[in-house]
Amino acid sequence: MTIIENNRRSLPLAEHARGKRLGVTCQLKCANACTSPECNTSGNKTFQEVAHAALSRRALLGLGAAGAVAIAVGAAGGQAPVSGAAAAGAAGPGAAFGRPGRAGLRFEPIAPVASSVDAFTVPEGFTWEPIIRWGDPLFKSAPAFSLAAQTPEAQALQFGYNSDYLDILADPSGRTGVLVNNHEYVNPNIMFPPTADAAELRRRGDIYKAAQGMSVVEITRRRTGEPWSYVVGGRRNRRITVETVFELTGPAAGSDLVKTAADPEGRWVRGTLGNCAGGTTPWGTILSGEENFNGYFAWAANTPAQKRYQSTASTSTSTGWETYDPRFNAHDPGYVNEPNRFGYIVEIDPQDPSSTPRKHTAMGRFKHEGANVIVAEDGRVVAYMGDDERNDYLYKFVSKNRISGSRKKNLTLLSEGDLFVARFSGDSPAAEITGTGALPADGKFDGRGIWIPLTKNGRSVVPGFTIEEVLVHTRLAADAVGATKMDRPEDVEPNPKTGKVYLALTNNSARSAATLDEANPVTGNRYGHVIEMTETRGQAGTTFGWSILLLCGDPAVFANSYFAGFPKELVSPISCPDNVAFDSAGNLWISTDGAPSTIGYNDGLFLVPLTGPDRGHVQQFLSVPRDAETCGPVIHDREGLVFVAVQHPGEGGTVAAPTSLFPDYGSSALGDVPNAPRPSVVQVYRR
């Protein structure tokens, strides 16, 4: 199968990984990472291989630290939007969620929605509306969106494409605030009709540059608790694009590994790419993870460092930028380092539209899903990060300095600190990990782990690597210290109520019997799982316990799905966990990416209580439209508000034959209504 990108060229589209996305999404979003040769060819052990090694306590801790390690165990388009179970035509699983906590959001779970349904579905008693859609003007000088009259200049002044990480930051009054949203990638097939004209293809390429990156948008409402509207021309409104200048910070800034012909200093980078999930810091800045940056470059992939991020050589990309912008042709000796300038955690200040955004090299370079920060007991800040590729790793960054009352000082906290990678071990005999997902004899998949340092006090602690090499070629450094291969670590977030850390492992259909381990206990893992971790020496410590909270799937099909011991016949089917969030009561919320191709239902947002008799009771709150992914959940349960970003609705269609009409569905209430889907930020609230 091939996709024709506006007749510019035919790009090979390998059959996408069994149990993941549409093939077109695999090509455009991650350059077919799941079907390309594996980047991680290291011999690092799996959990199963280390579970029964005869380790002393000192060897287990890995750093010679004293003290026992506590094990953490958990006590076709055009359809109108609908709500409730009517979309699926069946009663929802389980009972209503009655009391998730004093501040929890009460709702009747919806039934799963068939993947052919083009509707945004919410519980009875709730309704929804978009706050902002792709192409909506942010500035008074911006034109109204027109699908047939897109220009680079207009798109740079309009809300970007394919929304991902989202946050809603209210000002102290509660009546104004800012919305911040990532724009991960574009889909030319549903933005434009086909063309073979070279000049037009280049013009469209510049539109793609302007459509990606991030948006900061002022929002307003009459009173606290009401839905939000966005403000055209708001003082803080801002677009960050592939042309925006970023400052590199940290030890790798200025090194030879990041210098190019256009930036001989190695300190100033144009653009951000593949902005996926993210996080909001305690000092009010936004972190954005540069994830699938490799697919934007034509490059040789002929060195170990390059192969670790791009397993095969490429001469063309889906955007075509390499044909006219030398930055994206890494075959050019002057720009061979350009890919080394992407794959970082980006930090922006949403309160200051004139500020220069930064890329923090101290936090490592890999396919960052995002980064989420918590303040440790000693006042240092800790950021958890997943590297979203099969058999890659889980990381943690601990700042050198402590948080203070000075916002100016806090803005430098992520520029210096120590970077760690996780090594896990399991507790059960290897023979009990059968690949079926059946629980071992002790009734749980669990174990312990250590955080292995990659850098310490501004120096490398990886033999044979300089500090710059560790931070630019982070995957190779993590290979060298024996980090544990994981099943595509996506979002990883600490619970602000408990400090426990929740890691979404979205799936790994290539998991074989030879590589089974206790934390990845299912061969051909189509549905993904969620791990709960407890830091056993404080948030900034180097030891942790872990247990599997959820083995996802439809219990009616996957008999060994597991929901923290909760009766599986009462849960909502869930597959491919991606982003996680928490409400004010500390309940876990999970958004999914890949359910249509695994369990036959649209992706959605799910509530999971973590304590009491309802622990593990997965309940579906909403479902997104056909072909779409649920991103960036924000839960303001005390106000009765839930927010999500709807990414790539109608991804499998074309301009001539759309498969989704979300979010307008023919309504002209919000102005221009193209016969095409528009990625959007949506708010859900009580009627």
Image (cartoon, rainbow, N blue to C red):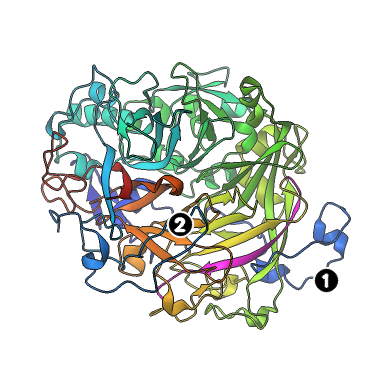
Quadrant in the rendering for residue 231 = top left
- The residue lying toward the viewer, choosing from 392 and 498, is 498
Which residues, given as a range, are shown in magenta? 540-554
Callout 1 crowding tier (Cα within 10 Å): few <14, some 14–19, many ≥20: few
Quadrant in the rendering for residue 416 = top right
- The residue lying toward the viewer, choosing from 77 and 285, is 285
The residue lying at 61 percent from left, 59 percent from top is: 485
Mark 2 and mark 1: Cα distance apart in space: 37 Å
**Is 405 situated above or below 443?**
above
The residue lying at 64 percent from left, 25 percent from top is: 412
Tag 2 secondary structure? strand
- Mark seen at residue 590: 2
Q: Which residue in the structure is indicated by mark 1?
A: 54
Tag 1 secondary structure? loop
User: Which is the main secondary structure of the residues drawn in magenta?
Assistant: strand
Q: Position of residue 446 (x, y in %)?
A: 66, 69
- The question of residue 552 being in magenta is answered with yes
What amino acid type should be assigned to the residue bearing mark 2? Ile
Q: Decide if residue 653 is on the left or right side of residue 612.
A: left
Q: Position of residue 153 (x, y in %)?
A: 25, 21
